[in-house]
Image (cartoon, rainbow, N blue to C red):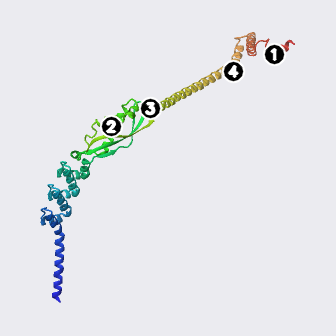
Amino acid sequence: MSALIGSAFFIILVIVGISIFLHFVPIGLWISALAAGVNVGIFTLVGMRLRRVPPSQIVLPLIKANKAGLDVNVNQLEAHFLAGGDVDKVIDALIAAHRAEIPLPFERSAAIDLAGRNVLEAVQMSVNPKVIETPFVSAVAKNGIELKVKARVTVRANIDRLVGGAGEATILARVGEGIVTTVGSTDDHKEVLANPDYISRTVLTKGLDSGTAFEILSIDIADVDVGRNIGAELMTDQAEAEKRIAQAKAEERRAMAVAQEQEMRAFTQEMQAKVVEAQADVPKALAVALKEGKIGVMDYYNMNNVLADTQMRETIAKTGPVENNPKSDDSKK
């Protein structure tokens, strides 16, 4: 009985040992590499396991590169994987560049991949240029008419400037700026409508692709629409602003006139009050003069006669001549 238990325990140990060995030593992958003519040692595969590098993500791209005639080794691929790169995409990009006879060394391809760009897409764009369509760009000619222009920009990836070069957003911004400048320099919007290629020719000569990861091949105007009359709207707004300024100044002058009128009215009332006050002092002054003997009784009567005569003259002036007065007719009867 003990012999059977010992045999079973030995078999279990053998199975566990074989499982551990196959885990650290991918025999199938090693055989595939040998069959493809790629020299990858057993200890190299075990080292990948220990460094937590999946051997399949290194060996299979290496086989692919070897079949394509590329000169890469295990250390390069493993280092790129440990740096966080996509080994399979880099190898595909190298193969595509090799087939298209585009000079692309492994180090540059790895740098492009680590920079966050899709190196395979960049190589494909170098072979097959990409068309970028701009949104409608609003520009105003010198005569004040707004034009809305949409352009299609054909670009090709520049492998040498993929690391550190600006992206598509910069291309779109520069093309939009060129459209605005070109339309703004024309005297009449009809010139642009008659020759839309004038925009593309002018913008293309400005070297808009400098410092970017692309090379502009052509700029084609897809659509030109006539927008608002910006010049007329600006003149209308200016006239309205001047009208409001004039109204404000007129209101200010009116307020000043009202204030002056109120001031003069207050002054008049003050003077009238002083006159009334002075008139109230006249009887007192006459009484004092009579008492002190400075004027006589006849002088007082003569003054009253002068006042009555003055009052009569004022009344006649207000009512008109005697012959036009209805009361005079009654008196004649």
Q: Which mark is residue 326?
A: 1
- Give the answer, above or below, for where 118 lies relative to 56: above
Amino acid type of the residue tagged 1 in the rendering:
Pro
For label 2, the SS is: helix
Amino acid type of the residue tagged 2 in the rendering:
Ser
Amino acid type of the residue tagged 4 in the rendering:
Ala
Amino acid type of the residue tagged 3 in the rendering:
Gly
Question: Which residue in the rendered view is the most extreme toward the bottom?
Answer: 1
For label 3, the SS is: helix
User: Mark 3 or 4 closer to N-term?
Assistant: 3
User: Mark 2 or 4 closer to N-term?
Assistant: 2
Q: Position of residue 276 (x, y in %)?
A: 67, 21
Q: Indicate the quadrant containing the N terminus: top left, top right, bottom left or bottom right.
A: bottom left
Look at mark 2 in the image and give the residue it sits on. Answer: 200
Q: What residue do we see at 20% from left, 49% from top?
A: 100
Q: Quadrant of residue 194?
A: top left
| Front of the two marks 3 and 2 | 2
CB under 8 Å between discs 2 and 4: no
User: Mark 1 or 4 closer to N-term?
Assistant: 4
Look at mark 4 in the image and give the residue it sits on. Answer: 280
221, 135: nearer the viewer:
221
Q: Quadrant of residue 192?
A: top left
| Front of the two marks 3 and 4 | 3
CB under 8 Å between discs 1 and 4: no
Q: Which mark is residue 58?
A: none
- Give the answer, above or below, for where 70 lies relative to 234: below
Look at mark 3 in the image and give the residue it sits on. Answer: 231
36, 144: nearer the viewer:
36
